[in-house]
Amino acid sequence: MHFQLAWRNIWRNPRRTAVIMTAIIIGVWSMIFLGALMRGISDGMVRNGIATLTGHIQVHHKGYRNDPVIENSMTDPEAVKTALKNALPADAQRASRVRVNAVASNARHTAGVTFVGIDPAREAGVSFIGRAVTEGRYLKDDDKYGIVVGKALVDKFETRLGHKIIVMSQDTNREIASRAFRIVGIFKAEMQATEKQFVFVTMQAAQRMLKMKNGISEISLLLPDAKEVDTVADSLRAALPSADYEVQTWRELLPLITAYLDIYDGFIFIWFIVVFIAMGFGIVNTTLMAVFERIREFGLFKALGMKPWWIIREVLAESFFILLIGAVIGNILSFLSVFALSGGIDLSSLAAGSEFAGMSRIIYPVINGRDVIAANLVVFVLGLLVSICPAVKAARLTPVEALTHT
Amino acid sequence: MNIVECADVRKTYQQGKVVVTALGGVTLSIKKGGFVALAGPSGSGKTTMLNMIGGLDQADSGSIVMDGNVYEEMTQSELATLRLYKVGFVFQAYNLIPVLSAVENVEYVMLLQGVASVERRERARIILDDVGLGGMYDRRPAELSGGQQQRVAVARAIVSDPSIVLADEPTANLDSRTGQGLLEMMKEMNEEKKVTFIFSTHEKLVMDYARRLIHVRDGLVADDEVREG
């Protein structure tokens, strides 16, 4: 009957209950929904970052990260590959690459690019390029002069499929190496910057142009379970001589995105606090009003022999019901909102501005269980905590004061 | 045997900058099974006296003993327990819980006492039948007349067999006919169940029903009249 009493009491003033419930619903909805949007953005950034040639883990020759020149290539990749075979999970994907800075030009334009030599079959399992070619075709193993370039670069160079592009870079003899390639495929990426930055040829074509023999710049790894990244990285570090090689995870390779993820976590936390403060004042105000309106009733309870703790419990039970209903509806609405936007929010018009941060053109809201639990805990725990103040006020009244209250 | 013993009970209140003496040293004793009226004009101290006897308020000095319990030696929590099991209250403004039905209002005290729900419901219905409200169990206070609400309040006060029922001007908001009916009912309960009733009143009708009439004036017992049967 205690719960029955609390339940009926909250409906004594339906309008007031509806107003505070609406505040809680909007609060919970905004916490979960905004959290899902932020997670969607950050997940997209991480996914893009990993797919844009980073992978979960990369292995380089010592010093390559600080100075990515051709001299810092791995000259004996077979030794590394043997070590990888033993340390990697069975279904992990790996791709070796030649990767150097270069200058691409045609008759009209010149641009700085990242010249990437890939193993077409293996690369398709690790990065975006395998499924990104929208015009022409993807590279074949025996493509000696074929090159795949981004749509944005093609537009910039005012060129098209079948036309030539000259790529110029420094070879292992520190001489300028250049070679003409014919565009066999045009790819589209999440970000225009990616389309402008990368040009892809086969590994053999790149090695021949740069006189690298069997040398490679990096090995990129994609694990079946992203949670294993640190464990696998540690075992690779143990397996490879640290004097010659360095192993880095995507968090180390993409420091900007890692920093954004931390900022987003902080932002979500601050948002939770802001929402709660606004909601907390509403809860305290409503509960205080409900207590003041019923001071004589609390006096009666005390006269009948109710202990102060029972009165606190009674007031908290009323707050609990309001919080519960608000939270349930808020949760349902936020899940429905995320479901309604599961096709993604297209931010193409803003993409140019947001690309610098690595954001995708389309955001897919992602509900994170931890955020949902945190939002509900914030509402329940803090909501009940702020209700204690009015509840204690009710409990501390003496029966005579309360019964004579007008 | 005395159920209430008050010795030199004094109580003052601060009203703004003025100190008002509500009780100026009341000494009295009330026998078990009594049907007693504390009579006097407004501000005479009768409600304060009733609150003191019920343990709702604390005296500045003096001693109150109810059914062997010495109030000055008891904590607020012990006083609350005493009120729960030994004292029933009937208020002038009925003071029923508006969101509970008649039967739930009567049950509420038993709920606080931890009585099982089936027993609670059964006892509440029996007592409501006794006060003439059979068939009105599920009506909420707003659906009952003043007289009916006060009957529910009386039922709530006596349902857990208290040692004493304190009624603060119980007929003040009722017409004389309804008030008389209520008094008849309480007198019957006093005689049948041997529950001690103490009223505060300034109405002649209530005074006429009392077997003992204590006149209170200026916070002191001015006159104490014991009547036959």
Image (spheres, coloured by chain):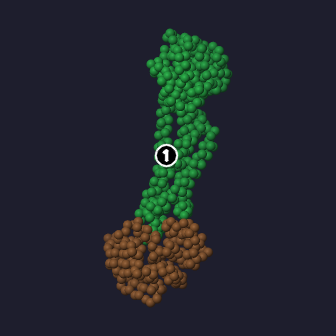
Chain colours: A green, B brown
In the rendered image, residue A332, in percent from the top left (x then y), is placed at 60, 49
Q: Residue at x 52, y 12 (%)?
A: A171
Q: Which quarter shows the N terminus of chain B?
A: bottom left
Residue B201 seen in the figure: no
Name of the residue lying farthest toward the right: A136
Q: How many labels does the image show?
A: 1
Name of the residue lying farthest toward the bottom: B228
Tell me if A140 is positioned left or right of B216 in this view: right
Q: Is residue A15 above or below residue B127?
A: above
Q: Which residue is drawn at 54% across and 39% down?
A: A38
> What chain is tagged by disc 1?
A
Q: Residue at x 49, y 38 (%)?
A: A264
Q: Mark 1 points at which residue?
A: A272
Residue B120 seen in the figure: yes
Which quadrant of the view contains residue B120? bottom right
Which quadrant of the view contains residue B130? bottom right
Q: In this view, does B134 lie above or below A289?
A: below
Could you say whether the residue bearing mark 1 is in a helix, strand or loop?
helix
Q: How crowded is mark 1: few (under 14 residues within 10 Å), some or many (20 or more)?
A: many
In the rendered image, residue B72, in percent from the top left (x then y), is placed at 35, 71
Q: Residue at x 61, y 17 (%)?
A: A202
Q: Observer-nearest residue: B93 or A243?
A: A243
In the rendered image, residue A118, in percent from the top left (x then y), is placed at 59, 19
Q: Observer-nearest residue: B223 or A342?
A: B223
Residue type at numbered disc 1: Phe
Q: Observer-nearest residue: B43 or A222?
A: A222
